[in-house]
Amino acid sequence: MPYTTVIFDMDGTVLNTLDDLTDAVNAMRRREGLTELPLSHVRKSVGSGVAVLMERTLPGGRAYPRFREATAFYRSYYESHSLIKTSPYPGILSLMEALRRRGVTMAVVSNKQDAAVQELSRHFFGDYMAVSLGEREGLRRKPSPDMVNAALSRLGRRREECLFVGDSDIDCATAGNAEVDCAAVTWGFRDRALLETLAPKYIIDSPEELLTLVPGR
């Protein structure tokens, strides 16, 4: 069955958010009197939601004495600084325009906090995205299938019609749990060598390659 729906991960798939994420982590660490972390450390730490990011960037993880306060500061700082250095990856906007012309419906799901997902999706993608979902109460984070299932329900689409596109092990597991096909992209936050071990249905090296998988209606 041809894909009528493409659901994208956000960070590392359609948006390069790494600089703003790193800046927010380091603003939090400076406030806590800690030294800054390199971008490479944050790159390996993102993808599983804010709480896990804080676990991986605070000494002692959840045992850190000011874990809740540091997390709250990070959330607030990132939500007000998420548009400083972030931008779509090259070719993403032209990909979305081509998909729309082919009659393909698009959505984005992310473990990023929902307020940031809504702002970033609206700012960069406008009406390309029929549904945008982030971390929120009552909706389990990826790799739970909840976000993909919620998006499909809102769109009125069957899972056989859906291709999930992401850049990480979390995304590949999400697609498997949601029983949808997965395309893993190599331009994001994880290396191709890791992606190959996960055996997604497709591995693609450029947004243009996605068009060969989604001919449209």
Image (cartoon, rainbow, N blue to C red):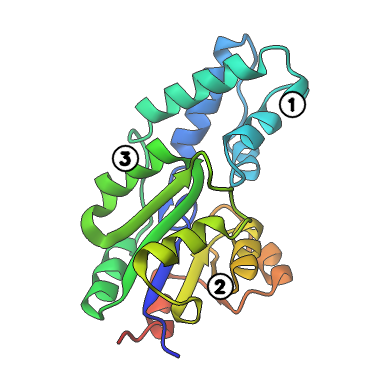
Q: 157 or 116: which is nearer to us?
A: 157
The amino acid type of the residue labelled 3 equals Glu
Q: Is residue 99 left or right of residue 49?
A: left
Numbered circles on residues, count: 3
The CA distance from mark 3 to mark 2 is 26 Å
Above or below, 45 relative to 10 = above
Placement of the C terminus among the 4 image quadrants: bottom left
Residue 30 tag number? none
Query: Would residue 124 be found to the left or right of residue 72 on screen?
Result: left
- Residue located 60% across and 79% down the image: 201
Q: Secondary structure at mark 2?
A: strand
Query: Within 10 Å of the Cα at label 1, are there few (<14), some (14-19), or many (20+) other Cα atoms?
Result: some
Q: Which disc is residue 182 wearing?
A: 2
Q: Position of residue 53 (x, y in %)?
A: 62, 35
| Residue 61 horizontal side relative to residue 15, left or right | right
Residue at image location 35% in from the left, 67% down from the top: 155
Instruction: Name the element at disc 1.
Output: helix
Residue 174, image quadrant: bottom right
Q: Amino acid at mark 2?
A: Cys
Indicate which disc, 3 or 2, sits on the residue closer to the N terminus.
3
- How far apart are the two marked residues, 1 and 2, measured between alpha carbons? 31 Å
Q: Split into 4 quadrants, where in the image is the N terminus?
A: bottom left
**Is residue 53 among what the camera can see?**
yes
**For residue 96, side relative to residue 184 (left or right):** left
Q: Amino acid at mark 1?
A: Gly
Tell me where residue 151 sits by quadrant.
bottom left
Residue at 74% across, 26% down = 61
Quadrant assignment, res 100: bottom left
Dot 3 corresponds to which residue? 119
Q: Residues within 10 Å of mark 2 (few under 14, many from 20)?
A: many
Question: Helix, strand or loop at disc 3?
Answer: helix
Residue 146: % across, % down: 55, 57
